[in-house]
Amino acid sequence: MRFLFLEAFHGGSHRDFAQGLAAHSHHDIHVVSLPARFWKWRMRGAALHFRQTLDNLSGFDGIITSGMMSLADFTALYTGRRPPALVYFHENQLTYPLAPGEQMDLQFGFTDITTALCADRLLFNSQFHRDQFFNTLPGFIGRMPDYKPHWVGAAIRAKAGVLYPGCHFSDAPSDPPPLPPGPPLVIWNHRWEFDKNPQCFFDALWRVARRGIDFRLAILGENYATAPPVFAEARARLADRIVQFGYVDRRSAYIDWLKRGFVAVSCAIQENFGIAMVEAMRHGCLPLLPRRLVYPELLPREFHGQFLYRDPDDLVEKLSAMLQDPVHAARHRPVLAAMMARHAWPAVINHYDRELKRLATGTGSDGRF
């Protein structure tokens, strides 16, 4: 079967998902995309661009899109018969945290709602994300002045499911390599943005350093012109410990850093799946994650006590203990790496192919796995 993937924000996890699905699916998936910038304009204007550039969809059995395009606008503007559509929600605008000084624009939340209503099938990237969306939806609708469409929750829920995104692990060994000699390496492999909470991360490192505990630091992840100022401060204060500072654009070089890493830390205030942490664990890093968001779902339960922290103080204590006795902590590396293999694209692609076949034929869906 042939499917058209319309990705209005072709960067980060959105790009990885679209490319991975197209590369691994047994169906023919054609990706049409826009650059990953001006996300607000993408949600408002991408449907107009795609409508103007895509005249005939009759050759496709279905459409795939993310929440960055208004499917309702696209459906209304398209003059022919629109193929059935699957929407994949990497994030949603009802629950996404606001940047400092920003006020919520309710229109983006309504775009998510109308997109979901127009979809034939809606998939969230985790159970946490799905639950958070539906728990927030009634209060969001309740903010409206009158004629409140409370019915939309049931209508959307009836066609919503959960499928974890696939990850690119073709270069992962069966077992992680031995830890390199020298001080253990701490990894940051997240975007340099407020929702990843870099202030909390660097505050913890400064506290650990003041205890006289030795470590090295690799700061990876995509960074932008408006990166939080704490990165510049950390570059000066931790200069003698930093071995990498900045985005690594070659994937092979990025993976090499993960293979050298001892622990990858997240302090995120927004995370619906966490591809960066799955990649880090798959290549041998131990995780240190907040006991909230998707992380209790992502991390196997038997590791919650050791690798999930309650608050910043608990983060400092757990990180200090791991760095002071890396050999003891490292015994968990092979088990975690093997467990993360279940997220590889070859392991999940049959679930997606079944979803797409059922989308095109109208025969129902798995719901989740």
Image (cartoon, rainbow, N blue to C red):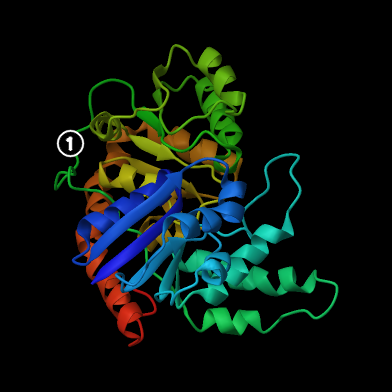
Circle 1 residue: 177
Secondary structure, mark 1, is loop
Nearer-the-camera pick, 1 or 80: 80
Task: Name the quadrant containing residue 198.
Answer: top right
Q: Is residue 314 above or below residue 219?
A: below
- Neighbour tally class for label 1: few under 14, some 14-19, many 20 plus, Cα within 10 Å: few
Residue 31 lies in what quarter of the image? Answer: bottom left
Residue 53 image offset from top left, x and y in percent: 44, 54
Percent from the top left, x then y, of residue 14?
42, 51
Of residues 45 and 101, which is closer to you in this image?
45
Residue at position x 32%, y 41% in the image: 329
**Location of the C terminus (image quadrant):** bottom left
**Camera-side residue of 87 and 202:** 87
**On the image, which quarter does residue 361 sit in?**
bottom left
Q: Residue at x 67, y 42 (%)?
A: 99
User: Is residue 151 rendered to the left or right of residue 37?
Assistant: right
Residue type marked 1: Pro
Where is residue 88 shown, x and y percent of the image?
44, 64
